[in-house]
Amino acid sequence: MKFTVVGAGGIGCYYAAKLIQAGHAVKLIARGDHLKAMQARGLTVKHASLHFNQPVDATSLGQWLSEAKPSDVDVIIVCLKAMQTRVFADQLSRWYQQYEGCSLPLMLSLQNGVENEMQFAKVLPKGTVLGGIARRIGAHIIQPGIVESIGPAQVILGSWPNHLDLNDSLLKKINSIANNFNDAGIPTEISADINKELWLKLIINNGLNPLCALLELETGEATPDLALMPLIKGAMEEAVLAAKANDVELSSNDLEEMFELIATFDSIKPSMLVDREKGRPLEIEEICGVVIRGCEKIGKDAPYNRVISTLLRRAVDRS
């Protein structure tokens, strides 16, 4: 298959490397020194089950949008920060509109948060938006052109928001993507309710990502800390409430399962901690704000998310 990875940072580069090794055509969309390094020296990805070091096809988003045609790509994999989604969705919509009537590529989001797919679905043709989750993976750019990653790097994907009224043609395409991912060594499952899966992942992100960024801790330092346990689970409980406010039924069992998932995973620096260390914008609104707003919809407060996000914003402003 032909893939384009938009936002080829740590996670995007890991999956790109696996797909390239399996013989797929992959174009990486990046920027800055990381893009220049990949263009000049290729890409290196280090993982316990993968050592990838070879030239890659990398370009800027602007150049790709001006040159690419639908026949050049089967699946666009989006790994951008969630705060970049709205702008890219509009750019992609204008690109799709140029080729109305053509067979258009599918768009698979592997981003943090629960609102990315909704933003894409508002402006992209019906049946082209897939939701996805990159689970049990830690991957970061350690220097331009070089990525280190850990974990089994699983993917869950499906038509957004679910598979109700899904036609056979789209299901066949989704199955083909999943089969190709699995053949490339990317453990992949198809979910008939990807919106629920996105909220399940948000429970983990909400409990650990902002708190680890605030306290500058790895996940393996935070989860065993009994003093932090009430804060972690309190934030996760608020995410469960926010899910219900958005018509996604989650339970306390789901919360415990997600906590166990992250507590037994290799210790990593969550994405928000890495972003804070590198002076980049944090996905506070996309991870905490969505929970606060969801709780407000049903007349509830989200004190854990409100306090943690406020303190994190103040800490970032002072650094």
Image: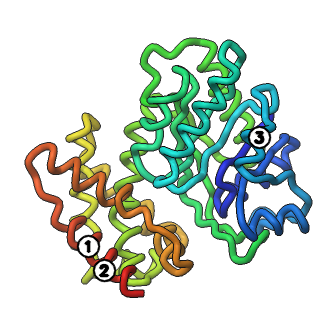
Position of 248 relative to 49 (above/below): above
Position of 50 relative to 245 (above/below): below
For badge 1, the amino acid type reads Thr
- The percent position of residue 190, horizontal first and vertical second, equals 55, 34
Q: In which quarter of the image is the C terminus?
A: bottom left
For badge 2, the amino acid type reads Arg
Mark 1 and mark 3 lie on one chain; the one further toward the N terminus is: 3
User: How far apart are the two marked residues, 2 and 3, measured between alpha carbons?
Assistant: 46 Å
**Which residue does the image show at 52% across and 20% down from the upper left?**
126
Where is residue 212, by image quadrant?
A: bottom left
User: How far apart are the two marked residues, 2 and 1, measured between alpha carbons?
Assistant: 6 Å
Residue under label 1: 310
Q: Residue 314 carries which label?
A: 2
* Mark 2 or 3: the one toward you: 2
Question: Is mark 2 in CB contact (under 8 Å) with mark 1?
Answer: yes
Residue 267 in sight in this render: no
- The percent position of residue 121, horizontal first and vertical second, equals 47, 30
**Which residue does the image show at 73% across and 77% down from the upper left?**
143
Dot 1, crowdedness within 10 Å: few (<14), some or many (≥20)? some
**Which residue does the image show at 86% across and 51% down from the upper left?**
57
Q: Residue 183 carries which label?
A: 3
* 114 to the left or right of 190: left
- The percent position of residue 257, horizontal first and vertical second, equals 36, 55
Q: Which residue is more in the foreground, 54 or 260?
A: 54
- What secondary structure is found at the residue carrying circle 1? helix
- The percent position of residue 84, horizontal first and vertical second, equals 51, 52
Position of 150 relative to 253 (above/below): below
* 254 to the left or right of 281: left
User: How far apart are the two marked residues, 1 and 3, measured between alpha carbons?
Assistant: 44 Å
